[in-house]
Amino acid sequence: MYKFLKKGRVAVSILITVAVTLAFLFFSNRETDIFNGFLKIQFVPALLGVFTGSAIILVLLTALTLLFGRVYCSTICPLGTLQDATSRTASLFKSKKSRRFKYSAPKNLMRYLILGAAGIPLIFGSSAVIAFLDPYSNYGKISSEITGRLEQYVHNLLSTVFPDTIFFRSYSVFIAGSFIFALAFLILVLAMSALRGRLYCNTICPVGTLLGLVSKFAAFKPEINRESCNKCTLCVTNCKAECIDLTNSTIDESRCVGCLNCMTVCKKGAVTYKYSWKKSGEKNEVTANAASEPVPASSGRRDALITMGLVGTFLAVKAVGKVAPLAAKPKKDGIAPPGALSIDNLKSNCTACQACVTACPNGIIKPATGEYGTDGLLMPVLSFDKHFCGYDCNVCTQVCPNGALVPLEIEEKRLTQIGKVRFNLKKCIVFTDKTDCGACDEHCPTKAITMIPWGDEGLFIPKVNRNICIGCGGCEYVCPAKEKAMIVEPNEVHAIAQKPKEEKQEKVKVDEFGF
Amino acid sequence: MERRNFLKAALLGSIAGAVQLKPENVFARESKEAPGQNDLVAVMGGEPEVMYKRGIAAMGGMKAFVKKGQKVVVKPNIGWDKKPEFAANTNPQLVAAIVKDCLAAGASEVVVFDHTCDEWQACYKNSGIEAAAKAAGAKIAFAHDEKYYKEVDLPMGLRLKKAKIHESIIEADVWINVPVLKNHGGAKMTMSMKNYMGIVWDRGYWHANDLQQCIADCATYSKKPVLNIVDAYRIMTQNGPKGKTTNDVVLAKAMFISSDIVAADTAALKFFNQFREMKMEDVSHIGKAAKFNIGTTDLDSIKVERIKI
């Protein structure tokens, strides 16, 4: 039965990883959003999006962990699957001896410190630390920066082979910091998994640590039957979590990722899932038998309770909506994508997975470097250098799994004011060169910019109505002046712009050509 | 390889351009002497395909402009991510009718493209032009990256002396310019000459260097369209060139066809002026182009046929 289960687990994990990866690749995320659904079933997005539609997913993920332990880590987490694949590939190049895993003691201090470092800022309304530690979001960064760029090169290579059917894709904006982080993280994870299986998941990953704590209460736990076990160590050498301690015949459920390897390799059938929610009397019997247990079960459970208290606090604070910002004067120079609601909301909920960055059809969303300050690194910020925000586009708001960008209908999006334009007359071509231009007016979707007569030479100059400007950046992008005359200033808190006025025209009856 | 191909194409292009320039000039001079041949046809009152059919017949039929085996480009305005009823782009039915006609006249291939302003895939799709042109048998060319453009000289240009022009125009034997008639915040009006902004890569340069002059300068490019077909089925009379709502649009049901780009734009402007006041001198690129002698603003000096359906 376990063999069958394992095959199922491998199949599901590959399916999810492929779907998540595709969600970050241009050719699949352009025309369809089915792959983006797989982003929403990830743990941290579900936790952060708990009040924006992901509550059910969070409950399901918690229930799954309460039933079977950390199976999330080996089925749903794409980074976990990447590590398994690496570990497996690496084993092909290893000697028989070095291929074997050994039991290693838990590095609890490190795990809980990292969990605290990632989790506590969340209570204070900052997702800045978790953004660099969440396995899904980092997998997203790798998909966007490494896999996505590779895909782009392949695509453009194909476009030279089939110039009529495959179009050349202009290269996406390169942010060195974002690329270097993704690359460094990828190398770290690949190295750790090639050498030591799920070492990353059991020492660094805060999601792994948190779910490990929940696993202590799981209904079904892997157990070694001491009577049938002949201590052949086959399970230990195949345990990539390195959590099977044969000296004491125990399995550390907080580190077990439920990969089912031990159960499938055991020739005696001694490793199995056992129902653990027995009545206390029976339980005592079991623990009495294991007299030499090194760590009293109660200490682990205490840690777990403290942590869950903190998660509860996080949820409570989030529910009440009172958030104490960490920095006294947060930096807010960037324009947040539509749906972000405010830069504070973005900084509280975004884990910089880059789903919006890769999904933007106009390629104007880039990972922030300094625009939002240090607590907003790599979070999405708009840049109007290469294009502007499409009036009839709401793609970024649809793909965000965290609720850092809330879904907007097209109608809402058209009125969502992410910034307001400021017009600098002295830099305008019409003013400096005394020639027609009007590029800004041409691109303005709401007619916040109109051209009005100026001077006696039949020239027209832009006039701005900031109340109906939505900050799409069409004017800023297209302004041909050396120093832009149109600059969009960010709205710290997004607003609702006034509806553009309807201008009915009088009907003119024309029967002649006019010449 | 690519360099050689490019040089070849450039050479062929310039020969084709030179060859083409001649008959057109001759044609312009001789037209008055050859009765029955119209210089400009204005049509009014029908559906796009019907007006086109009548109009092109009065111009002598597509075979007079497209020869058997020629590679043809049909260049509509697909600048904006707007549906046909907003009149921000050329009417897709008209584009399809022209494509079919070119193929019927023996064109070896017909290519349709535009350098869009909004995101290109959305424009191609929502304008309805990609689907209509493909169904009619045209090839859709990509035009969203600088890679698809090649530099050409504009020796007559005053402000615009060089421009990167889309490769399909450079490689084509003939091209047909199919703008839509609109009010325009910057250029005042957008018609045939303004439609050249969709065959070049760097439009920002035009805006920064006397837009009206650059529009006229680019119209001097040696490879001129064999036909300019101004779509005035729906016209945008305000808030152009992008428009806000269908309130900006008037159903005018007209079309202007001419090989003389200046005459086509003059006629279209005079027609537009009946809906909303627009002075010739404000749309100064028309006058500037006339100064280059690439066409005439004097509609009385050419043979015009007016067709009402």
Image (cartoon, grey):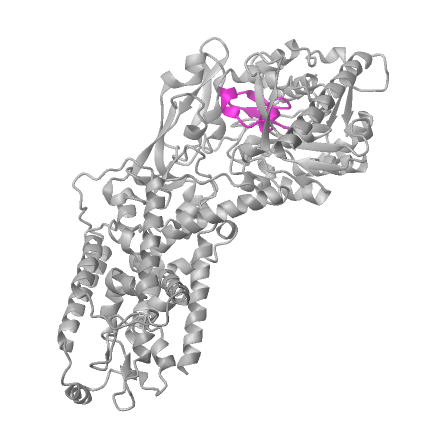
Q: Position of residue A282 (x, y in %)?
A: 19, 89
- Tell me what residue is drawn at x 26 percent, y 70 percent: A255
> Which of the image's four quarters has the N terminus of chain B?
top right
Count of numbered tags: 0
Q: Position of residue B274 (x, y in %)?
A: 63, 20
Task: Inspect this view and state whether residue A323 appears.
Answer: yes
> Which of the image's four quarters has the C terminus of chain B?
top right
Q: Position of residue B34 (x, y in %)?
A: 86, 15
Is the residue B57 above or below the residue A286 in the image? above
- Tell me what residue is drawn at x 28 percent, y 35 percent: A333
The residue nearer to you, when weighing A142 against B116, is A142
Q: Which stretch did the figure color magenta?
A: B179-207
The residue nearer to you, when weighing A259 against B25, is A259
**Image quadrant in which you'd find residue A467:** top left
Magenta stretch encompasses residue B189: yes
The residue nearer to you, when weighing A47 against B86, is A47
Task: Inspect this view and state whether residue B230 appears.
Answer: no
- Tell me what residue is drawn at x 46 percent, y 21 percent: A451
